[in-house]
Amino acid sequence: MAAGGSYSIVEYFGGDGGYRCGYCKQETGNFSHGMWSHTMTVQDYQDLIDRGWRRSGKYVYKPVMDKTCCPQYTIRCHALNFHPSKTHKKTLKKVNRFLSKGEMPVERHDEGREGEPMVSVHEEGVQPPPQDPLEIDHSDVQDISTSPDTDTTNSAAPTPPREDAVPAPEEKTPNVTPKPGKGADPSRPLGRKAKDIRKERRLQKEQQKQQEAKSSSVDPSPSKSSSNQPKSLEEFITESLPNDPLHRLEVRLVPVSFEDPDFLASYKQSAAVYARYQMTVHGDAPYECGESEFKRFLCDSPLEAETAPDGPDVGYGSFHQQYWLDGRIVAVGVLDILPSCVSSVYLYYHPDFSSLSLGTYSALREIAFTRQLQKQSPKLAYYYLGFYVHSCPKMRYKGQYQPSDLLCPETYTWVSIERCIPRLEISAYSRLSENAHEGDACALKELGRVLVLHRRTVMPYVAYARKRKGSNDEKEVEQYASLVGQTCAERILLYRA
């Protein structure tokens, strides 16, 4: 149970039928378990994605890894230890050249994110429930206590949106004229090694950065502890940007809430960019990417906005990170901010700017954003990129964000991707954990302790089974509880009609 006494409430749909795969396009090769989440706490969703689940709107699904045609492994990047690759640096420089000089690359070069298919509830063969089960009144649910040690932390509305404008880098330090010294010609300065001059310039830049950081309320880039260390991601993001660039890029974080004025003010424009992206990049028909589809997939979220004393200032929940170029939206990253991570849900951008590799650029900005949040909440240290699909070559780009781990589909433990690749080269599906004796630490042990919601009343499954009328649903409930794990099964409410 989450802060304020709220529960997650889900309806489980199973997953026996095969559907069209968005990766290899097989008509019946995609197998996944699914459930409709009417509401969900951020901690429950964190625990679910750490068991291989993922959401699309309010639909939460888990691939049947040993059966589906293209196994999808949850991947996370260690944001604090991330260093951009050569390709990442090229992308950042390309965007900065466009911002500072207006240079638009002719070629279209992007490692990914446009290859990510959007999971449709209708493709999975599941229709959204017409209404909340029995029009659940959350006040009724919260009044029912199943544990004497209920968490009483207050839940609060999301913090107002923050603006993370691209800052101008420090001015270049002028050349330092050496003092006259004693040499063959005392009227000329003493010769100095270029290495020493560069070192002195770096030191001066470092001192200037520290002064700027103190005068700024938001520090976008951590200072380097040593001049011998490579440039940080944040430094590459702001590198070469003049004080008055030709184009102005501003990154805004807005909570996904129709009660938020900034979200409402940009809703129509954001939906229009989404439609252009889907039609151009994914070949969708206009009716497949209208405003209702945009709302269902990218604006309807089951996650409750929460705040915590040890959490980030913006709070937890679902957000749109909007990229505003000269006053208009050119890209939007849909994010979930959770207790241990920033989880990327989707990315869409205006096709006119595809040559800027906005998919890669936004991923790098999201990693930098994760690092920024980690300063406020130490345990929030990972960036989840969704699913890694080794059997689909165009989806392997996610493995380039190093260091990263894949989730073992049998033990639900994390394994370094370098150790996983040799196994995945042999077989699309693989148990990734190398420990033969390791098992699922949250495996289902007590079915009777699974929580269900029946006639507005929260009760353990053992009590519900005694009251149940009609067909026996024990097999279905057992499958659901095995997939979410014992811990989540004892917290999440499984709706029973």
Image: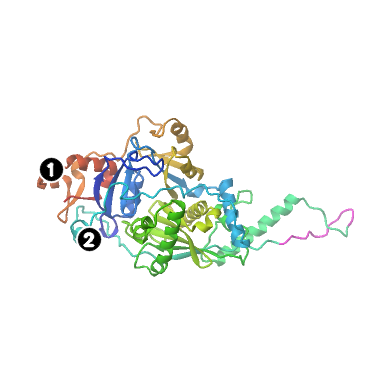
Question: Residue 57 at x, y = what percent?
Answer: 34, 54
Residue 112 to residue 211: above or below: above
Q: Secondary structure at mark 2?
A: helix
Residue 213 in sight from this viewpoint = yes
Residue 180 is a magenta residue: yes
Left or right, 378 with reference to 196: left
Mark 1 residue crowding within 10 angstroms, few (<14) / some (14–19) / many (20+): few
> Judging from the image, what secondary structure is the residue with disc 1 in?
loop
Considering only vertical position in the picture, is 261 above or below 319? below
Q: Which label sits on residue 87?
A: none
Residue beneath disc 2: 138
Which image quarter: residue 30? Answer: top left
- Image: magenta residue range: 174-185
Dividing the image into 4 quarters, which one contains the N terminus? bottom left
Residue at (37, 42) in percent of width and height: 21
Q: What is the three-letter code of the residue carrying label 1? A: Ser
Q: Position of residue 94 (x, y in %)?
A: 59, 54
Give, as a three-letter code, the residue at label 2. His
Q: For the point 23% across and 57% down, which residue is it?
A: 130
Residue tagged 1:
471
Magenta stretch holds residue 275: no
**29 or 86, nearer to the observer:** 29
The residue at the point 40 percent across, 66 percent down is: 268
- Indicate left or right for 402 with 289 as reference: right
